């Protein structure tokens, strides 16, 4: 019976939905994390009588026909581009992106990657890097004798020194944006890679070309809404149970058919 395979496809889809929700809830405290959403489409239809064909018995045109659906399939797990809440940390190397854009970093193999996690650190040589040690682009080195740092909304990094009233400009942080940010490839550790779907990175100064600005002393919290995720989890669980009921009902119908004498 087709109903068995259709219900099995429905259970598989709801299981994937639960897995996506589980990942969202697991990352509800991850800096700069954007929630994901599982998206589905119906499968191919079996055309037992196409709409618009001529009824052989009466010669009338069928207004709707008979099209039997064969289940559901996953189409994508898309990233919801939403601004997370900015939480004050007071850290002079903590920067939140308020608006569009990603910080560019360099992976160990030289590949450029992108992140919204602004929890930056210093190496022993004074280089500004991510929490995993990936250098931020463009490269900025903080002198050992600097007293404090200031990062303005446009990404300028200024250092203050003992005995000097005026700060010294160390460099300029930039932001990258993409035509389709949902097309970025997530590789973990809050990092993304450019793909053909995302389009090439467009790099500019924060605040220019529609990009967001930087806010020192803040970090962007996850955009996950726990209440919504739990509500979706309940709906997915009930959807899984209903599809299992269909399998049970189909099995009982098959059993009745087998027992016919």
Image (spheres, rainbow, N blue to C red):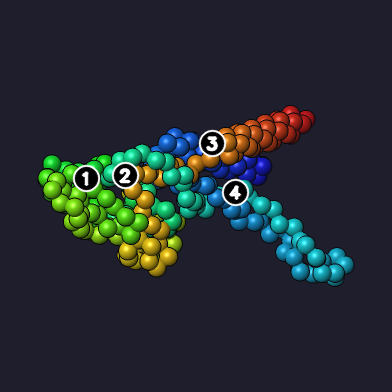
Front tag of 1 and 3: 1
Q: CA distance from mark 2 to mark 1?
A: 13 Å
User: Dot 4: what SS?
Assistant: strand
Upstream in sequence: badge 1 or badge 3: 1
Give the distance between the C-alpha atoms of the residues marked 4 and 3, in whole angstroms.
27 Å
Residue at image mark 2: 94
Question: Which of the two marks, 2 or 1, is nearer to us in this view?
Answer: 1
Q: Residue at x 61, y 36 (%)?
A: 231
Task: Name the disc covering residue 140, or none.
Answer: none
Question: What is the C-alpha distance between the residues marked 1 and 4?
Answer: 57 Å
Residue, disc 1: 148
User: Where is mark 4, residue-wise?
Assistant: 72
Depth check: give the residue in front, 241 or 101. Answer: 101
Q: Is residue 75 left or right of residue 151?
A: right
Mark 2 or mark 3: whose residue is earlier in sequence? 2
Q: Are marks 2 and 3 in contact (CB under 8 Å)?
A: no
Place of residue 234 in the rendered image (x, y in percent of width and height, measured from the top left): 61, 34
> Is 144 left or right of 254, judged from the image as shown?
left
Q: Residues within 10 Å of mark 1 (few under 14, many from 20)?
A: some
- Residue underneath mark 3: 226
């Amino acid at each position: 019976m087709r109903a068995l395979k259709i219900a099995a496809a429905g259970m598989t889809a709801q299981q994937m939905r639960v897995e996506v929700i589980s990942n969202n809830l697991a990352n509800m405290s991850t800096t700069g994390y954007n929630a994901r959403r599982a998206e589905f489409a119906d499968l191919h239809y079996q055309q037992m009588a196409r709409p618009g064909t001529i009824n052989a018995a009466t010669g009338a045109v069928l207004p709707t026909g008979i099209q039997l659906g064969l289940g559901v399939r996953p189409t994508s797990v898309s990233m919801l581009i939403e601004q997370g809440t900015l939480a004050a940390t007071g850290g002079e190397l903590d920067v939140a992106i308020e608006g569009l854009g990603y910080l560019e970093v360099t992976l160990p193999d030289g590949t450029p990657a992108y992140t919204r996690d602004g929890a930056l650190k210093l190496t022993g040589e004074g280089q500004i890097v991510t929490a995993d040690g990936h250098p931020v682009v463009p490269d900025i080195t903080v002198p050992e004798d600097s007293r404090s740092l200031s990062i303005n909304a446009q990404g300028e990094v200024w250092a203050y020194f003992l005995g000097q009233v005026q700060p010294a400009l160390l460099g300029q942080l930039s932001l990258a944006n993409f035509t389709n940010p949902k097309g970025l490839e997530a590789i973990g550790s809050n990092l993304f890679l450019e793909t053909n779907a995302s389009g090439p990175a467009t790099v500019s100064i924060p605040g220019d070309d529609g990009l967001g600005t930087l806010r020192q002393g803040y970090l962007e919290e996850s955009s996950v809404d726990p209440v919504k995720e739990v509500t979706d989890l309940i709906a997915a669980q009930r959807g899984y149970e209903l599809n299992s009921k269909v399998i049970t009902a189909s099995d009982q119908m098959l059993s009745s058919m087998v027992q016919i004498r």
